[in-house]
Amino acid sequence: MQTRTKALLAASGVAIAALSGIGGFTMAQASQPHMVNALSDLQAAQTELNAALPDKGGHRVVALRLVGQAITQVQAGVGVAAGA
């Protein structure tokens, strides 16, 4: 399987997991449009980083980790706003 195909499959898996993870935040989405938009943008960035060629001197890997942490924090923030 080609590297790009593997990366796209991995990104798809991440997107599905992220979408299922925010499923519980449906009520909060109406009152948190900026947080929901930020979450969507972070997930798009994660997909693009996963699709990028890996030879970036380790910076791509660090960026993926930080974007993942940011996604977790935004999800937690939405959850707090929803009273979770």
Image (tube, rainbow, N blue to C red):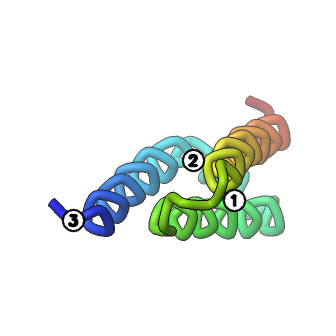
Task: Kindly identify the residue that appears in the image at 48 percent across and 53 percent down.
Answer: 19
Q: Secondary structure at mark 1?
A: helix
> Quadrant of residue 84 in the image?
top right
Amino acid beneath label 1: Leu
Q: Number of marks in the image?
A: 3
**Mark 1 or mark 3: which is in front?**
3
Residue 74 in the image: above or below residue 56: above
Determine contact: label 2, label 3, CB under 8 Å. Answer: no
Q: Which residue is mark 3?
A: 2
> Disc 2 marks which amino acid?
Ile
Residue at x 62% of width, y 47% of height: 61
Q: Disc 1 designates what residue?
A: 39
Q: Residue at x 60, y 53 (%)?
A: 26
Taking the view exactly as shown, the residue that stands out farthest to the left is 1
* First along the sequence among labels 1 and 3: 3
Q: CA distance from mark 2 to mark 1?
A: 9 Å
**Is 51 left or right of 60, judged from the image as shown?**
left
* Horizontal and vertical percent position of residue 18: 51, 48
Residue 15 position within the rendered picture, expressed as x and y whole percent measured from the top left: 45, 56
Mark number for residue 22?
2
- Crowding at dot 1, Cα within 10 Å, few <14 / some 14-19 / many 20+, comes out as many
Q: Do the numbered discs 2 and 1 sit on residues whose CB atoms are within 8 Å?
A: yes
- Quarter in which the N terminus is drawn: bottom left
- Looking at this view, is 54 or 76 the one in front? 54
Q: Amino acid at mark 3?
A: Gln
First along the sequence among labels 2 and 3: 3
Q: Residues within 10 Å of mark 2 (few under 14, many from 20)?
A: some
